[in-house]
Amino acid sequence: MIIVGGSSSKDLAKELARLLDCQYVQALSTRFPDGECYTRIDEESLDDDVVIVQNTYPDPNLVEMFLLQDVVRNLGAKTVTLVIPYFGYARQDRVFKPGEPESAKVMCKLLDMNCDRVFTIDVHKEDMLRYFTCEAKDLKAAAAIADYFAGRKIDMVLAPDIGAAGRAKDVGTRMGVPYDHLQKTRISGTEVRIQPASSDVNGKNVLIVDDIIATGGTIVAATQQLKEAGALSVTVACTHGVFVNNAIERLTGSSLDGVLCCNTLENSVSHISVAGVIADALR
């Protein structure tokens, strides 16, 4: 097996190759003056099963993925597996207004044209993987998050809403601690109370887990109210730290005691590695 690292996921790809004890090849990707992508793999042949590790977000990384698929095929790859740590356009999975595209479906079909297998990590809607004709599986980061926080004095795991309750259950069960989800109750036209659905956080160290954090506004508001309810500490961990509009600064400057994410998107707080989860799937 040969691991090819795209420009978006170099560190993750290197760690994956180390865990699997296989060859690592770094794609040489740059941009022409007009912004178009140029990529090259400095190998004469890739006569083996090839795994490309590359995000499809933002758009330039998506184009790079298309080009890498073509390159490895031309170099003789026996099979091509795509590991897409963060799948761009996954949140655009349905048509809300007439005239809109099903963006997630479009991206699946384009990527599907030149691969034999696809792995995603905590994709926004797992059902969208049905648009691939090849084998496609979504891997879960819960084990990596639970392992990271094992022994770090976490008393309770919370999801930010009922839609993410399954993730909190998975992480909490693995850690052997209670789990719950937050719910919003509107008190007035301007006031909203955010609290656990059925648990008491007084005197407890709380871990909030989510799949994606973009702006972090809800997390900041929830943290403040959890602290007011007596929580000793509140830490947040997500799979994908998108962090738009200075979100990292907003989160770290709030009353949160810790902000972490997985290395599906590499940034200053991506200290939780999903390489082990991916390696197990590839084995």
Image (cartoon, rainbow, N blue to C red):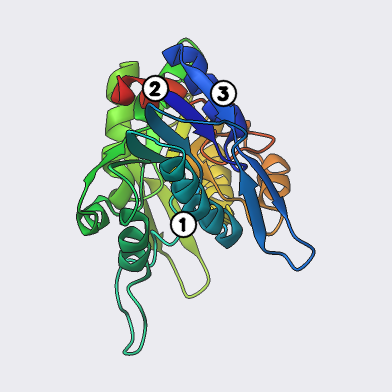
Q: Give the image quarter of residue 118.
A: top left
What residue do we see at 30% from left, 16% from top?
Answer: 176
**Residue, far front:** 44
Residue 246 at least partly seen: yes
User: Reading the chain from its start, which is encountered first: label 3 or label 1?
Assistant: 3
The amino acid beneath tag 2 is: Met
Where does label 3 land, which residue?
A: 14
Q: CA distance from mark 2 to mark 3?
A: 13 Å
Where does label 2 land, which residue?
A: 1
Q: Is residue 100 above or below residue 245?
A: below
**Residue, far right:** 33
Residue 3 or residue 191, whichever sits in front: 3
| Element on which disc 3 rests | helix
State if disc 1 and disc 2 touch (CB < 8 Å).
Answer: no
What residue do we see at 32% from left, 80% from top?
Answer: 96
Q: Give the image quarter of residue 265.
A: top right
User: Reading the chain from its start, which is encountered first: label 2 or label 3?
Assistant: 2
Residue 170 or residue 67, whichever sits in front: 67
The amino acid beneath tag 3 is: Lys
| Element on which disc 2 rests | loop
Within 10 Å of disc 1 (Cα), the crowding (few <14, some 14-19, many 20+) is many
Q: CA distance from mark 3 to mark 1?
A: 22 Å
Please tell me the numbered disc located at residue 88: 1
Residue 274 at least partly seen: no
| Element on which disc 1 rests | loop
Residue 112 or residue 12, whichever sits in front: 112
Residue 121 or residue 21, whichever sits in front: 21
The amino acid beneath tag 1 is: Gly
User: Reading the chain from its start, which is encountered first: label 2 or label 1?
Assistant: 2
Whole-percent x, y for residue 98 in the image: 31, 89
Please indicate whether residue 42 sits to the left or right of residue 120 in the image.
Answer: right
**Residue, far bottom:** 98
